[in-house]
Amino acid sequence: MTLLSSERSAARLPDSKPPTADGGVYGWQVPPIHTAPPAISSAGQEAIDLAARAGLRLDPWQQHILRVGMGEKPDGSWASFEVAVNVPRQNGKGGVIEARELWGLFIGGEELILHSAHEFKTAKNAFKRIERLIRQTPDLHKRVKTYRQTVGEEGIELHTGQLLRFIARSKGSGRGFTGHCNVMDEDMILGDTEMDALLPTMAAVQDPQIWYLGSAGIGAPSVQLGRLRRRALAAIETGEPDPSLAYMEWSADVHLDECPADCTAHDDPDSDAAVLKSNPGVGYRLTLEKVARERATLSTAGYARERLGVGEYPSDTADTWQVIAEEAWRALAVGDVQAVAGARQAGPVALSIDMTPERSHAAISAAFPYLGGVHVTVVDHRPGTGWIVERAKELHGKYGPRCWVIDPASPAASLIPELEDKETGLGVQVVKPKAREMAAACGQFYDAVTTQSLTHFDDAPLASALAGAQKRALGDAWAWARRIPSVDISPLVAGTLAKWGLGAEVEEPPGDILSNVW
């Protein structure tokens, strides 16, 4: 996960509970992932003050969201057309929504504020909360013409015509309305059909704004949130703010499979520091003791998602082939199998194994010299893992590879002891690249494509992996990102390591290399 922009929190919190002036323990009040376009003023303080008049006292982090999200350009228009808030459950994002909607009704003069949620009951509950705030504030209540209670028509209308409507999202909901402000609650369940229905309603509005609020992505349903997050991370990576998006995310950057035992670059998911970094409501409506009970009860993946904000975000079809262009990859395909086989007979071969984090699929890939460069191919790719060792033994006896390569920090590392065992496996030492060598392998693979010194058979598993592949930071370099929903990159990782294995320092195996082609 890429961290921060210009408003990065000053430092990582230690694992111990940090004391504060009043002796309490509080979560980060500024998000670890934060980007926004420049603004010279903000209407956020007006929203904060109005919420306080209604009895809604906002936490510092909630106030921060409003000040950033309601930032203004020199002409008074919104600096951010879109504002996205990604924070784990039960921290208090509802208070931010209510403050923004109160401002739009009673100060901003927004003619229509459209509040949508993925389920009717969620929208209904939001209506009830803001209705209570208004009714208990006499100078606001007297400005209300009617509280619409009819099912499906819930809303609050002022005597001056402003209207706040609450709807459940669907393919057709929102059509026919012209929203000055759209509030998309529970945005981790928000796809193209809902956006197609709601967003065009704002086209005819001068200076509209859309707010997305929710928790960590849950895979396929999080289409729009995934897009917003990618835009934000791209802005942070380049140092150039997205011209229309303010994005604020509280989440932990937990250890990767490749992390050494003493890694300090990522967060320990079992630590209080990770909780404080991802939960700004700690100290206000959450406690570390309550979170500890969650940690003991939830699954590892469930706890990471629901409490630490570690989400799964689907790739957009428009965002495929992000690392290597499809045209560049397809141009390197060769179809003359016999010519490749003939070239392989004269040179060494390296084989590599990789598998998905869920252990649902695995791949064996090979690399060998060809036409002054390297040819990479997928030897086998199947569901499950039970087939790998026997297939590796078969290939080892058939081709006498110079080495086998497995990333020791990957799920496939569990196979290494059996493969190295003389009785059950190959009886040879598996080459285990270190983290810096993983980064070097990825860089070498990329460079070989760009310099056209790599060829392939246009294997479908390898092409599919590259189509959805993304980078992840690894020190000052990068490696292939394993944790991508619905993308199996095991053929790509195995091919990358096989190519690297051709140059790794190993003891050459005895005997002739056979000329078979798989």
Image: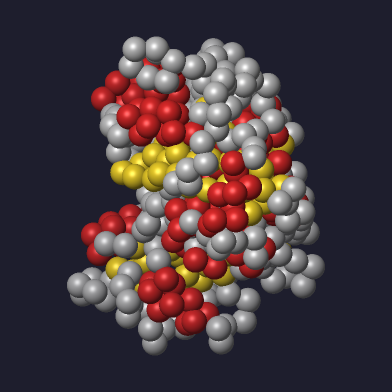
Q: Is residue 29 above or below residue 454?
A: above
Residue 44 percent across, percent down from the top left: 62, 55
List the single residue furthest toward the left.
151
Quadrant for residue 89, please give it.
Answer: top left
Quadrant for residue 466, please give it.
Answer: bottom right
- Colour scheme in the image? secondary structure
Q: Please name the residue shown 66% across and 43% down the image.
A: 369
Quadrant in which the N terminus is drawn:
top right
Q: Is residue 20 left or right of residue 356?
A: right
- Depth order, front residue of 148/372: 372
Q: Is residue 434 left or right of residue 176?
A: right
- Depth order, front residue of 402/312: 402
Q: Please name the residue shown 31% across and 43% down the image.
A: 383
Q: Is residue 436 above or below residue 18?
A: below
- Depth order, front residue of 223/394: 394
Residue 318 percent across, percent down from the top left: 54, 68
Q: Is residue 13 left or right of residue 415?
A: right
